[in-house]
Image (cartoon, grey):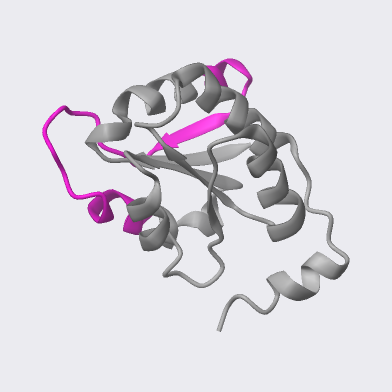
Amino acid sequence: MKIAIGNDHAGVEVKEKIKEHLTKKGHTVINKGYDGKESVDYPDYIHPLAKDLNNHDFGIIICGSANGVSMTANKYNGVRAAICWEEEIAKLARQHNNANILSLPARFIEEDKAIKITNAFLETEFEGGRHERRVNKIDR
């Protein structure tokens, strides 16, 4: 899979662990995030990822709470960013909502939990059926 990953200053460490994990699993990870320690504005990194999502299988976005990055990404038609803090939430986001961006709250989950959530998200298929009808009503 080709996965775009973006983050602000709060998500640098989690991003690096996820990148390493996904690369070891054979995925191509495109870093569209910030790599420094100084405070930055998350929209500067999330807008480019969301605009370019069609060129990737999935996206992963990370900030302190996951709220700001999700709000930014979800402004784009075709983007369905889901804030996930548990594996079950990630599975449901894929199964029922066909989420294509995983949004992680770096300040509220440990790195090993972030990897488990990422695996659950990427390994879960969209169920379609009644859910597809609902997902088709999201974009305007």
Q: Most extreme residue toward the front, as rendered?
A: 108
**Where is the N terminus found, in terms of image quarters?**
top right
- Residue 128 appears in the picture as rendered: yes
Q: Is residue 73 above or below residue 85?
A: below
Residue at 88% across, 66% down: 129
Magenta residue check for 35 = yes
- Residue that extends furthest to the right in the rendered view of this protein: 129
Apparent side of residue 117 relative to residue 120 in the rendered image (left or right): left
Residue shown at 25% from the left, 36% from the top = 34
Query: Could you say which is closer to the camera, residue 96 or residue 98?
Result: 96
Res 105 quadrant in image? top left
Residue 120, magenta (yes or no): no
Where does the image place residue 62, in percent across and percent down from the top left?
Answer: 39, 40
Residue 121 coordinates in the image, percent (x, y): 65, 39
The count of marks equals 0
Residue 138: image x %, image y %? Answer: 61, 75
Q: Is residue 78 left or right of residue 130?
A: left
- Name above or below for residue 111 compared with residue 48: above
Residue found at x 83% / y 61%: 128
User: Is residue 20 among the parts visible in the rendering?
Assistant: no
Q: Quadrant of the C terminus?
A: bottom right
Q: Nearer the viewer, residue 124 or 91?
A: 91
Quarter location, residue 51: bottom left
Magenta stretch in the rendered image: 20-48
Question: Residue at image x 66%, y 51%?
Answer: 93
Is residue 69 placed above or below 22 in the rendered structure?
Answer: below
Asked whether, in this view, residue 71 is left or right of residue 96, the answer is: left
* Left or right for 96, reference 23: right
Q: Quadrant of residue 10?
A: top left
Spot the residue most to the bottom: 140
Q: Position of residue 46 (x, y in %)?
A: 34, 52
